[in-house]
Amino acid sequence: MSAIGPKVRELRESASLTQEDLAHEASISTSTLSRIERGNYQPRMDTLGKLAQALKVPVAELLG
């Protein structure tokens, strides 16, 4: 499982966002976000950038 997925979920939940909310803010589909959080999809850097921006964290925080 990718370490990115659990980190995205942790940050999303701590921001009190639903998957739908975060997906909308990051301009990605809810199904893609779900796959990322489950570790079934390794997002590209542009997607990581969108997620980081929506979560108001640096990309490095998602990676480590």
Image (cartoon, rainbow, N blue to C red):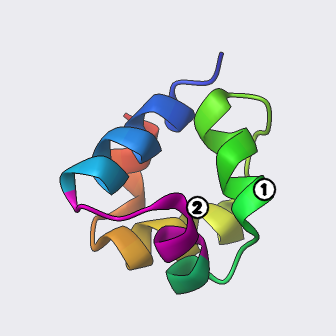
- Rounded to the nearest angstrom, the CA distance separating label 1 from label 2 is 15 Å
Residue 25, x across and y down, in percent: 51, 84
Q: Is residue 5 above or below residue 28?
A: above
The amino acid sitting under disc 2 is Leu
**Residue 44 visible in the snapshot:** no
Q: Nearer the viewer, mark 1 or mark 2?
A: 1
Outermost residue toward the top in this view = 1
Mark 2 burial class by Cα count in 10 Å: few <14, some 14-19, many 20+: many
Which corner quadrant of the image does residue 59 belong to?
bottom left
Query: Horizontally, is 54 left or right of 19 in the view?
Result: left
Mark 1 burial class by Cα count in 10 Å: few <14, some 14-19, many 20+: few
Query: Horizontally, is 43 left or right of 54 in the view?
Result: right
Residue 56, x across and y down, in percent: 28, 74
Residue 23, x across and y down, in percent: 60, 71
The amino acid sitting under disc 1 is Ser
Position of the N terminus, as image quadrant, is top right
Query: Horizontally, is 29 left or right of 27 in the view?
Result: right
**In the foreground, 49 or 17:** 17
Query: Horizontally, is 61 left or right of 31 in the view?
Result: left
User: Reading the chain from its start, which is encountered first: label 1 or label 2?
Assistant: 1
Q: Is residue 2 above or below residue 19?
A: above
Label 1: state its secondary structure. helix
The residue segment tinted magenta is 15-23
| Residue 10 magenta-highlighted | no
**Residue 49 visible in the snapshot:** yes
Would you name the residue on which mark 2 appears? Answer: 48
Disc 1, disc 2: CB below 8 Å? no
Would you name the residue on which mark 1 appears? Answer: 31
